[in-house]
Amino acid sequence: MEYIIAPSVLAADFGYLHRDLEMINSSEADWLHIDIMDGRFVPNISFGPDITKTIAKLCSKPLDVHLMIVEPEKYIQAFADIGVMSITVHFEASAHLHRTLDLIRSLGLKAGVALNPHNPVSLLEDILTDADIFLLMSVNPGFGGQKFIYRTIPKIKKLKTMLDEVNSEAMIEIDGGVGLQNAEKILHAGARSLVAGSSVFRSSDPVHTIKELKNIPLHTYL
Ligand code: DX5
Ligand code: ZN
């Protein structure tokens, strides 16, 4: 079964960004996840388009941008100009989600919608065919290194059923507290993209951890 491993650069050592991105380039990682935080939608500030541009120059993997910001529509063009692969905006931050997703797709990128842990997947019912990625937060967004919320597992199953019902090929991505301890459960529930920050960058051998995450022994019924 094919699935994506997307290490989150938020957990990298920014003093050694070049070294950490070389590590990602030499690994089996599929994408690099880019967490953009504005101190308004989430209680933390990370970095913006300029640093992302530097990352894009140093990283050979497709960039998966996660906008944890208010008014995300204002910054879509700036990230598209950098040549990122996808842009995901929060359901909770978008007053006109259809318009925002259309804009992302019109720029030739994959469009994603992210949902905070307190929100039910039923909220996504009317946008199932308008996005390529559905990102379920498995921690409250804002910080790396938090504990996985297990209530996410039944949400993945429910969303997978909803997507199947409309014949959608969209991918479910899980973000927050993901590691070797829960990857199989998450994949089994129906997710096809795993974001992993601290479990990769805090590992003593990140390349090996990425390899292990890419090769989770899955039961044959998957
Ligand atoms: C949380 C971010 C995540 C975070 C994941 O707000 O959206 O992408 O970097 O980090 P870990 O894997 O450490 O929970
Ligand atoms: Zn993220």
Image (tube, rainbow, N blue to C red):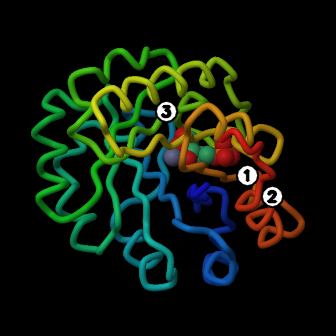
Foreground of the two, 55 or 193: 193
Q: Quadrant of the C terminus?
A: top right
Above/below status of 71 relative to 122: below
Toward which corner of the image does residue 2 lie, by quadrant? Answer: bottom right
Question: Residue 113's x, y, as percent?
Answer: 33, 38
Question: The N terminus appears in which quarter of the rendering?
Answer: bottom right
Above or below, comparing residue 126 to residue 129 in the picture: above
Could you tell whether 184 is left or right of 79 in the image?
right
**Mark 3, mark 1: which one is toward the viewer?**
3
What is the CA distance from the residue labelled 1 to the residue labelled 2? 5 Å
User: Which residue lies at the image location 53% right of the left edge and 21% below the top edge?
Assistant: 155
Q: Which residue is mark 1?
A: 198
Q: Which residue is mark 3?
A: 136
The answer to which quarter of the image holds residue 151 is: top right
Is the distance from the Cβ of mark 1 to the nearest ligand 1 atom less than 8 Å? yes
Left or right for 78, reference 36: left
Percent across and percent down for residue 111 are 28, 50
Give the vertical position of 70 relative to 57 (above or below): above
Marks 1 & 2, CB-CB < 8 Å contact = yes
Position above or below: 119 against 215: above
